[in-house]
Amino acid sequence: MSYPFLPRASALALAAGFGFAISPLCGWAQTDHPDSKAPLATAETAVAAEAPFLAENSAAMDKMMAGMDVKPTGDVDADFAAMMIPHHQGAIDMALAELRHGTNEQLKRIAQEIVVEQQQEIIAMRLALGQPLPAQAAAPTQVAPAPTPAVAVHNHSSMSKNGMTMTPPNPTK
């Protein structure tokens, strides 16, 4: 049975209310529709392509949640910072995942701003509590320069032909 007057979100909510397990990524709520398999395949492909981002984001969330699980010390300020620093680092890690995998330039600019602002707030919290600052490192949004290969010395001093030996020029003359 189809209810064309219901918006899709309402139809999904109604179906969920009746105990139907419907994923919001399913494409079509009606399985007897002639195109019901195409949107599902497209959604599955999109989710598979998003897997590296989802894995990084999930790891960032897990790390953040574990870091925020702080045993109270009796010092409200220290406890606040102890919970907020991993929270801010989680935001940084999620923003870096967006920068690596996202394609929307506006969102990528926002992600860059999140990285900078959250790093500044972490530093401010540590300074307020007199804690040492983390060691300076390259900005996480910048690609580290590739190491320069060692240049081999080009030397012909061991070459000879027909009894003649080549000697390198003397730079002191």
Image: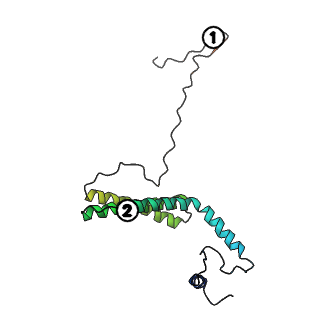
- The vertical placement of 44 against 15, above or below, is above
Judged left or right of residue 128, residue 18 is right
Judged left or right of residue 37, residue 122 is left
Q: How many marks?
A: 2
- Which residue lies most toward the top here? 163
SS of the residue under disc 1: strand
Point out the tag, 1 or 2, that comes first from the N-terminus: 2
- The vertical placement of 81 against 169, above or below, is below
Q: Which mark is residue 68?
A: 2
The percent coordinates of residue 17 (x first, y second) are 56, 84
Q: Which mark is residue 50?
A: none
Give the residue drawn at x 67%, y 10%.
162
| Three-letter amino acid code of the residue under disc 1 | Met
The percent coordinates of residue 113 (x first, y second) are 43, 63
> Which residue is label 1 attached to?
164
Q: What kind of colouring is applied to the model shown?
A: rainbow
- Which residue lies most toward the bottom here? 5
The percent coordinates of residue 127 (x first, y second) are 27, 56
